[in-house]
Image (cartoon, rainbow, N blue to C red):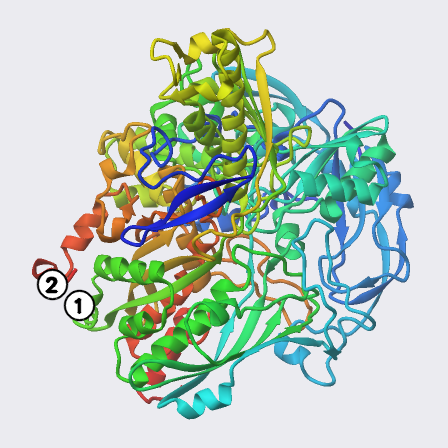
Amino acid sequence: MSDNDVRLGFNGHFEEKKMELATGDPPPYDPSRKFRLLGTRVPRLDGRAKATGEARYSIDVLLPGMLYGRILRSPHAAAKVVEVDLAAARKMPGVRAALAIAEPGGVVRFAGQEIAALAAETPEQAEDALRAIRVQYAPRPFVVDPVAARKADAPLVFEGEAQTRTSAGDAPGGAAPLPRQGNVQGPRATSKGDVEEGFRKAHAVVEGTYVTQVQTHSALETHGLVARWEGEELTVWASTQGIFSVRDELAQSLSVPASKVRVHCDYMGGGFGAKFGARVEGVTAARLAREAGAPVKLFLDRKEEQLATGNRPAAIQWIKAGATRDGKLTALHVVVHGSGGTNGNTGTTAPAKNVYACDNIKTEEYDVFTNAGPSTAMRAPGHPQGAFVLESAMDELAARIGMDPLEFRMKNDPSEIRREEFRIGAERIGWASRDARRTTSDPAVRRGVGMAAALWYNTGRPGPKATVKIHRDGSADVEHGVQDLGTGSRTMVAIVAAEELGLPLERISVRIGDTALPPGPASGGSTTTPSSAPTIRAAAYQARLAVADRVARQWKVAPEQVVWSEGVFSAKADAGKRLAWPEACALLPAEGVAATAARAENHPEGWKRFTAGAQFAEVEVDTETGHVRVRRVVAVHDCGLVINALTTESQIQGGVLQGISYALYEDRVLDRQTGRMVNPNVEQYKILGARDVPQIETIVLPVYDGVNNTHSVGIGEPSTVPTAAAIANAVSHAIGARITKLPITPEAVLEAVDRARGGAA
Amino acid sequence: MSDEPKSGFTRRDLVRGAIVGAVVAGVAPRSAPAEPSAVGPGAVPLELNINGQVHHLTVEPRVVLADALRDRLGLTGTKVVCGRGACGACTVLVDGQASCSCLMLAHEVRGKRITTIEGLTRDGAPAAIQAAFVASDAMQCGFCTPGMVMSCEALLARNPRPSREEIRDAVAGNLCRCGTYPHVFEAVEQAAGLRPAHAAGEPPERIATSLPGGALRLTSDDRVDDALAALPGAEEGLA
């Protein structure tokens, strides 16, 4: 440990701090430092492989003798399994293995739940054989509507204890068991101050109920893996956000040591929170492969993906908020009934609790179980829903006290970073003229501008390790078991190493996506970069010190006498002693030198706790058709210190577009009569397309928070948190009536327009 | 291959979702009428002209082109996402026309020229549109990218200087879940010579304005500035 002086903060708000550094961990970058590569626009290293089709995704893996696995699913939303008969299916042409996933007496809780599986020589044979599996069910009453599920006489989703864990690798759910009545579990409650007292102090109080839909992840590559046994050793190629969590779940489920399981993920086609574990399909593929004595590829089809692999839960959120007439929030009370099908942990109140300063806040979260596919973590779990209710109420309150919504937020936001973001975004969207722009040349078309705040966490974590090896020719290898979800992690690893070693990118070889490598982080919670980047930097730093050590020996001076700058080693005491990187590396032994570093703990002296963002949206609403078109979005985010400006822009654009899609289009629809999803595809489950893309302006505010040695912060989740809320506020501004439901369909817009006109609703 | 009975299958089942594909806006008609010599239920030998090479394979009549490419020929650059013509991930060129290979039976395209994503690369060098996709970062997870590239390649072949609206239309049938569309638009414009390529490693300051508060604008699309300038009140400094 050593004490270091560091400068932390952001433009105009820097402060000096003393920071204790772990041994071998370099001090956080100084804000004055100029970088060669870090923060520039670097095209992703695997871009060419992706653009030419050479990139081998896990679903692309073809092995000699490989079989194709398929899963049979329940058509019933609730049933008891009486019998699963595989005999006829086993006799079908090409079938090499079959197994029951549900046992007799097992309970089906949603349409799409896994019942049995088989593997055959061709995909077509597997599909045919699936139809030969005979399953006898005893159907039971079910409920798929969260409102109906809360009624006293509703069919019970869980007769006994609620079993909500779907995969050992899933993001951890609510730890403490909660009280349950019927299908309603909860509350998870928090309380600060006294909300009743807060409402008494308020000059204006607003109250409303906001409803949000179920959104599915809809990653383009489905869930699944390819499994191959060699004796007792299992190798898999998985589409995953966590190669190590897949390994551990497989080892646990199959009762083999983790050391005998190796997981690869070179390329994967999107996760968005739903791909941490091996899950049923992964474990099933490995079992089928063991039974058949041949490799098995088991990837879900689009319908299965929609039914059973997770989703963002629905929510009915009631909010009551109060403020004084000079614009001080006095009380916030939120009650949520979230519904994640057979899963719990559907809370949405993190924004209400953490974004705005308020002395009196009360939150109560309930989970409503239904006979529907389980929810799982989805890009900023709970936050887009929570931002929608909070930011809608903020606009309502501002209107009630006659204050500009931007000014109202500035008065109540304790984050100086976000207040700066509000100022920047307001200028870029043209906030000051927003009222003047409400009318357009078409009398039926109204324009609106809305805004919302994002909050996320400083969530990089210790645990990951990386090895950096320097070769005699001066090139370097980086080994780090992280996976690249498309965020550009592979390139991020190379940039950080190249920056620390003073090498061009071409001299760095990156190996990721393999559990045989030093462990990387799972990619969730926007933790990948803030977990990996400091690890890579520490390993490269130590590897460079190892080279310096060789130089010291050559010069017969103490190692601390050797300094490195701009690719040249020199001796502190002897100006004549200089060695450029290639000559220094030529001194290395044949095998080169390597250093393995572990990520240090987050520095408790770090400058901030939350990551702030702000988004502004401009929309046009046709008041005759109800059609909403998003024209522009300005997204202003704290991304710590940006490592790659190009991929950061991509990721923020992606977060915004998913947010627009959530706000306007996406909606999982379940049929109350049959309990089945009626749009398990990607055309009736509507997702934003090329024609719906507005102009997006992405702006980052560099913040040197010192939480880790690269100041890096994840941007994946914060970039999608406020979008839907900003759009809802923009639509409300355009039509003069509050939007209380997502998605904002033409029907919902027309209903609100009617309400505003005082007409029949 | 087996010779199990295939009773109960109709061709309509096999190309399920064809209607869906036909209504996806912006996608050219994608299936040609089957030849009258359509084959029967068992696996049948087949000759396909793919990327200028003749491939021999034996597949059941129900196997769609996408699966034949991926599972039988190992041409896995072509992706399958929806299997019903709604997402464009499986887009290949059939006689130069962007087509959903998940909606066409392999036997249906005998005698036609098929170009897959692998066929755009010449002697190891990526095509201009592929290079522009890399430079513009018109990809994230990259799973939609091959199909997106094929749609853009077909667009540029018939319209070398497309407008932004024409680009939108050309990829309206290509679903990207990561939201790469803005960079896809820029990549096509770059490949068409309508926009300069930014050099790799360029610091954001060189492209984007530094804003008050030390903020950096990452946006590489100068149309954003045009939009801003067009706002009412912009001249008075309101915008």
Count up the numbered dots.
2
Q: Is residue A632 above or below residue B37?
A: below
Q: Quadrant of the C terminus of chain A?
A: bottom left
Relative image position of residue A747 (x, y in whole percent): 41, 73
Residue lying at 36% horizontally and 26% vertically, measured from the top left: B131
Label 1 packing within 10 angstroms: few (<14), some (14-19), many (20+): some
Which image quarter: residue A223?
Answer: top right
* Horizontal side, residue B176 vs residue A461: left or right: left
* Horizontal side, residue A310 vs residue A456: left or right: right
The answer to whether residue A737 is visible is no
> Helix or strand or loop: what does disc 1 sit on?
helix
Q: Is residue A326 above or below residue A270?
A: below
Q: Is residue B96 above or below residue B148?
A: above
Residue lying at 88% horizontally and 55% vertically, measured from the top left: A103
- Disc number for residue A721: none
Which image quarter: residue A710?
Answer: top left
Circle 1/circle 2 CB separation < 8 Å: yes
Chain to which the residue tagged by mark 1 belongs: A
Q: Residue furthest front?
A: A573
Relative image position of residue A214 (x, y in whole percent): 56, 64
Read off the residue under disc 2: B233
> Helix or strand or loop: what does disc 2 sit on?
loop
Separation of residues labelled 1 and 2 (CA atoms): 7 Å
Q: Amino acid at mark 1?
A: Ser
Q: Quadrant of the N terminus of chain A?
A: top right
Q: Amino acid at mark 2?
A: Gly
Residue lying at 73% horizontally and 58% vertically, measured from the top left: A165
Read off the residue under disc 1: A433
